[in-house]
Image (cartoon, rainbow, N blue to C red):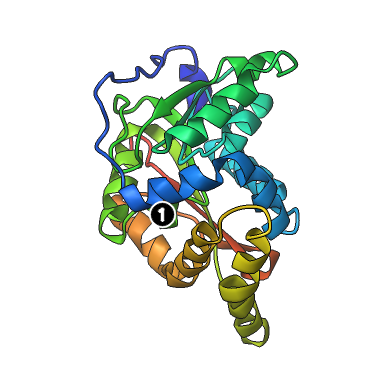
Amino acid sequence: MLFLMAMDQKPTPEISTKKPAPPTAHTVALFTEVAPKYEFLNAVMSGGMDKRWRTAMLTVCESALGRKPDAVLDLATGTGDVARMMADRWPQAQVIGTDPTTAMLQVAREKSAKEKSPRAHKKITWNEGIAERIELEENSVDVITIAFGFRNVSETLRQKAAEEAFRVLKPGGVFAILELGLPRAKAIRGIYRSVLKHGMPQFAGLFAPKEPYRYLAQSIVDFPAPDAVKKLLSKTGFLGFAPRPLSLGMCWLYVGKKPNADL
């Protein structure tokens, strides 16, 4: 692949010291509330499928890139699940995880700093920041992911977030969005919608405040259809791959590739 010729020649991405613009205060407050139990509740709510979905995303990213990446960025990293999986899968890469919620990043840092944590986890860079203003140099990262966080970007700023990912990616780099959605089959879509609106908040309320999960349920229902997300990526300049439904459409994977410099 063309990328192999330049693997050792690309500069390491430099993190800006500029303070990122403040995210939506309401969203930050909600995620601050659930930070301590965020991973547990995600696993329960997805029926244990969330890790499998993340693994699928990273597998597709590596395949689309055509090699192992040197530098990767996980946006809306939360408590760092994807960033740690990146470090495990690509120990040679520089891994950066960013999130607007201080409490989430605190959990991520604590997990990575544990004595028994793999060495690769301890090398992850955790940075407070937002998807619509990435504090990295242009053409500096091979892979950018955002798992279950794109719907939390304000609808008016999603195009800007995609443009920022495009700017920061190296030519040929890959941008992946993993997002919860509604099943394709009409027969189960209504049932699933009811579970989201009523069952999920009630169950989550046994372990954490209900309000963040009411927001989660509504954000899934309100998120644009797969074709709209694909159109957004194409408008940004990404070479699009067909949206991939996972688990009957409970989750969707969107992948865009930044064109090579010679295209």
Tell me what residue is drawn at x 25 percent, y 27 percent.
19
In the rendered image, residue 253, in percent from the top left (x then y), is placed at: 55, 56
Quadrant of the drawing holding the C terminus:
top left
Q: Position of residue 236 (x, y in %)?
A: 29, 51
Looking at this rendering, what residue extends furthest in the bottom direction? 187
At horizontal 37% and vertical 49% (from top left) the residue drawn is 238
138 displayed left or right of 27:
left
Q: Nearer the viewer, residue 130 or 69?
A: 130
Could you tell me if residue 69 is visible in this image? yes
* 68 in relation to 118, above or below: below
Q: Residues within 10 Å of mark 1 (few under 14, many from 20)?
A: some
Pointer 1 residue = 152
Secondary structure of residue under mark 1: helix
Provide residue 2's location: percent of width, then percent of height: 48, 27
Which amino acid type corresponds to the residue marked 1 in the rendered image? Asn
Say whether residue 1 is visible.
no
Vertical relation: 147 (above or below) 21: below
Please tell me whether residue 198 is drawn above or below residue 141 in the rendered image: below
**In the displayed structure, would residue 190 be above or below residue 163?**
below
Horizontal placement of 140 versus 107: left or right?
Answer: left
- The residue at the point 38 percent across, 19 percent down is 13
* Coordinates of residue 24 in the picture (x, y in percent): 31, 49
